[in-house]
Amino acid sequence: MNRLKVFLFLITACLSVFCSGQQLSNQTLLTIDGNQYDAGTFMRVYLKNLDIVQDESQKDLDNYLQLYIDYRLKLLQAHEMGLQNKESYQTELKSYRDGLAESYLTDNEVTEALVKEAYERMNTEVNASHILIKIDRSAVPADTLVAYNRIKELKSRIENGEDFAAVARNQSEGPSAKTNGELGWFGPFKMVFEFETAAYETETGEVSDVFRTDFGYHILKVNDRRKTPEDVEAAHIMTYDQRQDSTINAKQRIDEIYSQLESGKDFESMAVEFSEDINTAKNGGKLPRFGTGGLNAPDFEEAAFNLTEIGSYSEPVKTKFGWHIIKLLKKYPISTFEEAETGLRDQIKKSARSRKITESFTNKLFDKYNVKLPKIASYEKRFPAVTDSLMSGNWKNEMVMSKSIPLFSIEDKTYGEKEFYSFIEEKQVKDYRKFGSLEEKLNVYFKDFADESVIDYYDENLERDNEDFAFIYREYKEGLLLFELMENKIWEAAKTDSLGQQAYYEKNKDKYQWKRRIDIDLTQNTTEETAQKVKQLLEAKTAVDKIKEQLNEQGNTKVMISSGIVEEEYSRLPKGFEVKKGVSKVYEKGESGFYKVVNVKDVLEPTAKTFEEARGSVINDYQQQLEKEWMETLREGRNINVNDKVLDKVKKEIEEKTRA
């Protein structure tokens, strides 16, 4: 698999999309047995390859054209052998296409805007209060209107001077009513997207317009803004408010611990002995990294954020859990955009923000294909076969339709009732959304059906409708097929043909020679003193295992010794090393950071490698010979024609581009 990845990388590197040769793109440069190959593709391949090619001869366009013909001949043979029909090839290709297509089945402009917006919001936190009037998304219009009018009335009361906190306490239907609607500090991804957006778009001290979420209608007031505090690592010592085994109250206990710390006691030791948080006490009170909202204890978080010096600790802090003394261990700066980008993309993909991307993308596709969806006054009447059993997810499609009644078309493909009913039957099984009526559910399902249909249609036609995708996919497809061919015709044959390998070795023995080599013990020492001791021990013929045993201590390795036969240019030998039998001098610490002593046990003059010693190189060279012989046969019986007029145009245009 690793060889496949490297091979495909090299192929696609040479065959990447390069926007050039537009005027020539549809003109035929060459034909092979009637198969036409256009000039535009050839120019893209050549110009891209020009930047990375090492062999100067390949930069000559006529030479490169011959390589290109060879490439096309290989692919033709692969097709003639039917390699494109192999199950393993089809499976690998489908997996790649699915992964590649994913990045094309989205609205990249909207995605980029959402990523940048989320990063900007990451740097600021909002403190807000809100008022909620609950209304389910599935509520009937009459109930929705009642809820909307009620929230509008509450907003008017606040605009006319009533205190937001008082109205929230007495009228809000959310759990924060008991805290006057206060939600504390939050940043992006902490609230539902609509709520977050309203908070960030409302000025400090102002009340937002009415907005709706899955929970109901809201208004919010922005109390304050601040720069997002850095995430921290902290440790704490905690005493619980109520303990049945002690009459000493938590405040008294924490004060006594604080006094001990002030007198110089070690924080970690005190946490192990006295902290009543059994989950952290054994680790010296250490907590995982956290930011705003990470501990569900705002007072604790604020106290930790307010510590500025690493190693400093707070005075006792009261939270809903008890009393704490907090020690700052580490602060984490806000991530740069580059550091945060990948994580933000993943969060956006998994959050409600993704709806905006899908909605924008499908709307663009509807425009692209000029899709006209039918205007349906009543979905229940339009689709009477769908009964109330759909509301519980148990509807059975019992319609037997010889012909599907059309609903809409995408280009020449029609989507009708038959397809919609099949979609509904499958969709209901894993749909956990709540709906207030059959009419609403059918309405939503029809929109989902249309959206998924247009995305699937675009996916099916990506090669036709997206030039960038078409080139990248084709290059991988051809590269993968070429890999299958080379594996079949050359690599596997060369690897398993032991007689052929042996014969090649016997014929080319002079190619496989050892350079001058040395049999050594190479010692790397942490100090000059250790190196001198090692030198003395080697000169006394002490075995290397004994040397390590004598000088190394548990947890403190002073000397490392490598033994074996190496060529005299071996990179780990000390700089300026003089090859001669015996124990060398101590070489000064170089870039490696070690003092080195080398024991040369023997010097081996140049000699021929045995077949086994040369086997890896032999197989590689044998593969190249087999490929060369095979390539010489590929053109036999082929009708290859180059259009010289088009080739002249290609040369002229490439000359202009490379000169520019």
Image (cartoon, helix red, strand yellow):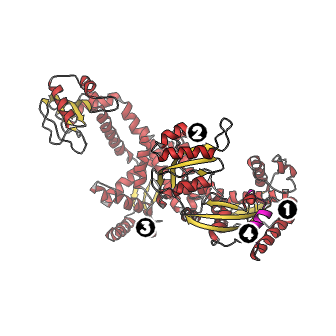
Q: Secondary structure at mark 3?
A: loop
> Separation of disc 2 and disc 1 at Cα?
49 Å
Please report whichever mark, 3 or 1, sits nearer to the chain's N-terminal start: 3
Q: Is residue 47 above or below residue 87?
A: below
| Residue pointed to by mark 1 | 140
> Separation of disc 3 and disc 1 at Cα?
60 Å
Q: Nearer the viewer, mark 2 or mark 1?
A: 2
Q: Nearer the viewer, mark 3 or mark 2?
A: 2
- Residue 593 inside the magenta-drawn segment: no
| Residue pointed to by mark 4 | 164
Q: Nearer the viewer, mark 3 or mark 1?
A: 1
Q: Name which residue type carries label 4.
A: Phe
Please report whichever mark, 2 or 4, sits nearer to the chain's N-terminal start: 4
- Measuring from the top left, give residue 243's x and y in whole percent: 67, 39
| Residue pointed to by mark 3 | 21
Q: Secondary structure at mark 2?
A: helix
